[in-house]
Image (spheres, coloured by chain):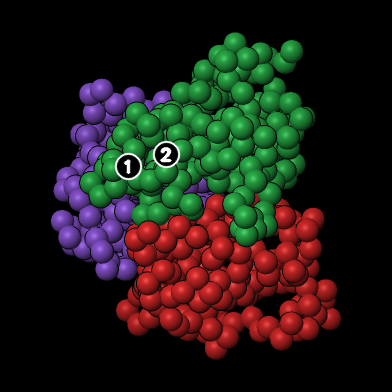
Chain colours: A red, B purple, C green
Amino acid sequence: MANIESRLTALGLVLPPAFSPPPGMVLPFVHVRRIGNRAVIAGHGPQSPEGPLAKPFGKVGAELSLEQGYVAARLTALSMLGSLKRAVGELDRISHWVRIFGMVNSAPGFVQQPAVINGFSDLILELWGPEAGAHARSAVGMAELPFGMPVEIEGEVQIAD
Amino acid sequence: MANIESRLTALGLVLPPAFSPPPGMVLPFVHVRRIGNRAVIAGHGPQSPEGPLAKPFGKVGAELSLEQGYVAARLTALSMLGSLKRAVGELDRISHWVRIFGMVNSAPGFVQQPAVINGFSDLILELWGPEAGAHARSAVGMAELPFGMPVEIEGEVQIAD
Amino acid sequence: MANIESRLTALGLVLPPAFSPPPGMVLPFVHVRRIGNRAVIAGHGPQSPEGPLAKPFGKVGAELSLEQGYVAARLTALSMLGSLKRAVGELDRISHWVRIFGMVNSAPGFVQQPAVINGFSDLILELWGPEAGAHARSAVGMAELPFGMPVEIEGEVQIAD
């Protein structure tokens, strides 16, 4: 089994299937856009292993605790890894993480966005290690996110030749 | 006439002239930054065909309906296409759409940002088709946008050699 | 002395040391990610010359005036230049500025985000001039930012061979 996927299995983690939007909602974009060695990644949210968006919905600092926000960011990483696997075939082909833009649906006064998005970064670094997994990152507070998701993350990775 | 522009004409659409900021406002940046084959695009808002920002202003879900937000996103696409034409000379030189970051000035509780930004994506796909027009996208809710614009969108495209 | 750094010195400006997060806060990402000639830059905030985040904290349009927001954006540029110097060795190696994404912690109704982020752009253009310093930019209003920072800016530059 490939390297990254065997680590996922060892951690007991499962990649969800492609996200199906709610009935009546059309999402006319691709989850991963390949341009040469770049893979530019659309905004992803926390997906349950079965496919739908993971609960709870709402704002971190109100409906969700910091700890629940961290879990949502980790589930967002799994959703993104599922999209990347479908797009590039094999997660081991990701040679460098590049950029992560982490958006937290934030209750008024909630200012610990970095601690939430660490749920994403910690998993990437656990899987890819400190060299390939290193990424530039922002973690910021949004007024609203689609469907009331607590977290949305977009980014970019580099694909080996 | 070039391919993309003949489609614009067939749709009855007109690209606006370069945006002039309100008196006293200096915007010291370029609308499109070329780096090799990449064209990185600054944040654009809905422009009327004559040039000024298009009305109405305000937040989608309050001052604007979802349908008005969709129209604003479509006008934002036309503003961006005007900038791209001035920067690269010919819209047909855009070989791939890459990334779209769609920001919606959102009233509290408004969570249909994707349906708003579809006003942008639908036009790009109508003009470039599903291969060249495919793009990674986020659609998210902002607390405020400059001048009270309802929508602001930035992105990146690839230019053919 | 190198070109850009001699200009900084002539302006009486000092680059701060690496940012140390508050106790208990882990920031598991890199401030600059190099991929070929690209340097992708994480979100930075206003840093005082000694290293900690610069005061005041809060939202522009409430706790901070527009003028204080402009100063915060200028201090954010110095923080980013410090990271870039540590990452690439010499600021003169930055051949092109590419993309700036300027986020303003915005009080309700504050819509002058571009005038705030001009504190960043004006300094970059003063140092690099209108060709190398040109950048695509967005300037937008966030609901919250980490630690209550008034400004956070991420971006990308091109490094000479």
Is residue A102 toward the left or the right of residue B121 in the image?
A: right
Residue furthest to the bottom in view is A50
How dense is the environment of label 2, judged by Cα within 10 Å: few (below 14), some, or many (20 and up)?
A: some
Q: Amino acid at mark 1?
A: Glu
Q: Secondary structure at mark 2?
A: loop
Answer yes or no: is residue B55 visible: yes
Is residue B61 toward the left or the right of residue A105 in the image?
A: left
Q: Earlier in the sequence, mark 1 or mark 2?
A: 2
The quarter of the picture where residue B126 lies is: bottom left
Q: Which residue is mark 1?
A: C63
**In this rendering, is residue B13 above or below B69?**
above
Residue at x 55% of width, y 52% of height: A138
Q: Nearer the viewer, residue C36 or A55?
A: A55
Q: Amino acid at mark 2?
A: Pro
**In this rendering, is residue B128 above or below A119?**
above
Q: CA distance from mark 1 to mark 2?
A: 8 Å
Q: How many marks?
A: 2
Image quarter (top left, top right, bottom left or bottom right) of the C terminus of chain A = bottom right
C-beta proximity under 8 Å, tags 1 and 2: yes
- The label number, if any, that marks residue C56 in the structure image: 2
Q: Position of residue A132 (x, y in %)?
A: 77, 58
The quarter of the picture where residue B9 lies is: top left
- Label 2 resides on the chain identified as C
Q: Nearer the viewer, residue B107 or A97?
A: B107
Q: Secondary structure at mark 1?
A: loop
Residue at x 23% of width, y 46% of height: C109
Q: Position of residue C78 (x, y in %)?
A: 57, 30
Q: Are marks 1 and 2 on the same chain?
A: yes
Residue at x 56% of width, y 63% of height: A115
**In this rendering, is residue A103 above or below C50?**
below
The quarter of the picture where residue A89 lies is: bottom right
**In this rendering, is residue A26 above or below C2?**
below
